[in-house]
Amino acid sequence: QWGLNSNWIGKTIIHKQTTPSTQIIAHQAAQEGAAHGTVIIADEQTQGKGRMNREWHSTKNKGIWISIILRPAILPYLAPQLTLLAATVLADVLNTHAGLRPLIKWPNDILLNGKKTAGILTEMQAEQDQIQYVVIGIGLNVNHEKADLPEDIRSKATSLKIETNNTLAIKEIIQSILLTFEDTYDTYIQGGFPKIKKKWEGYGFKVGEEIAIKTLRKRWKATFIGIAEDGALVTKAEDEEPKKLYSAEIEWFKE
Ligand code: BTN
């Protein structure tokens, strides 16, 4: 049905018309032994999950809501590399498939013209030093009109349709994401993180520039040096040593 000419990704595809969240289905499937590369696709999510416990609006047939189950033989602390990898995959697909110029806002938001069009949620099950499985959740706004976006995010979110004036074929984009993912992942397993890091930094929003950083407790300015081997945001504030940040946000949007 999906006609995917792949080696290992999407050999099993679980397709739901509607589901609370493809992440939940993916966790269940993985716990029941689903293979590396199993993909969950939904037309609609009623309780889509975003990072930091936020909700992710997943309107029926307007976007791509998928989760990919991976069983990588890497150490758990390196799992954030997979999020960065997934972000480069999305950026590549938007670039080659839709001719767009996406930027990646650390760690994983895809921006078009300064507005968010996609997000990635990585969840991992690990025991001691071993990953049982990783679920990479990808949400991409495709055919939303402005009015389809919830009012509270309308000023800072966008979709491929809003940016290109074209209605795009969701199925083709899913195929392209999965095939590009397979390719990029294979390169990563064979050649390590440096290539991914380089690509990510090429798409990186404000790499080398001054950024405003926000954590739960404070807000400050520093230069964005790049990303570290473990996925951290590397910054340098004046008169300080470079610092690695793991859970912070880059402030980006001005009303
Ligand atoms: C974010 O930017 O906060 C991450 C958003 C991730 C959304 C996707 S949609 C498919 C998968 N299922 C979910 O419930 N969330 C992820």
Image (cartoon, helix red, strand yellow):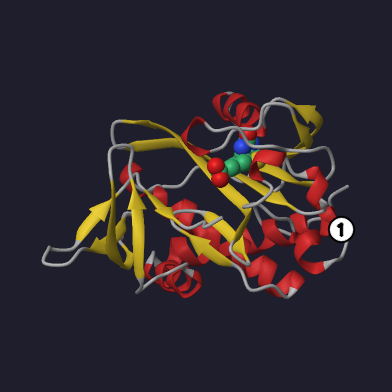
Position in image of residue 249 (x %, y %)? 40, 49
Across the whole image, how many numbered discs are drawn on residues? 1
In the picture, which quadrant includes the C terminus? bottom right
Q: Nearer the viewer, residue 194 or 238?
A: 238
Q: Where in the figure is residue 107, as x and y percent of width and height? A: 44, 54
96 versus 40 height, above or below: below
Left/right placement of residue 31 relative to residue 126 reads right
Q: Quadrant of residue 236?
A: bottom left
Residue 7 place in picture, x, y as percent: 67, 57
Ligand 1 falls in which quarter? Answer: top right
Residue at x-position 12% and y-position 63%: 240
Question: Label 1's element?
Answer: loop
Q: Is residue 92 left or right of residue 170?
A: left
Decide which of 42, 55 is in the foreground and name it. Answer: 55
Give left or right: position of 251 versus 49: left
Picture coordinates of residue 48 (x, y %)? Answer: 65, 32
Residue at 50 percent of width and 30 percent of height = 53
Q: Is residue 113 left or right of residue 131?
A: right
Q: Which residue lies most toward the front here?
A: 255
The residue lying toward the viewer, choosing from 69 and 145, is 145
Q: Which residue is mark 1?
A: 169
- Say if 184 sits above or below 248 in the image: below
The three-letter amino acid code for the residue at tag 1 is Ala
Instruction: Identify the residue at horizontal 82%, vertical 46% (top origin).
Output: 147
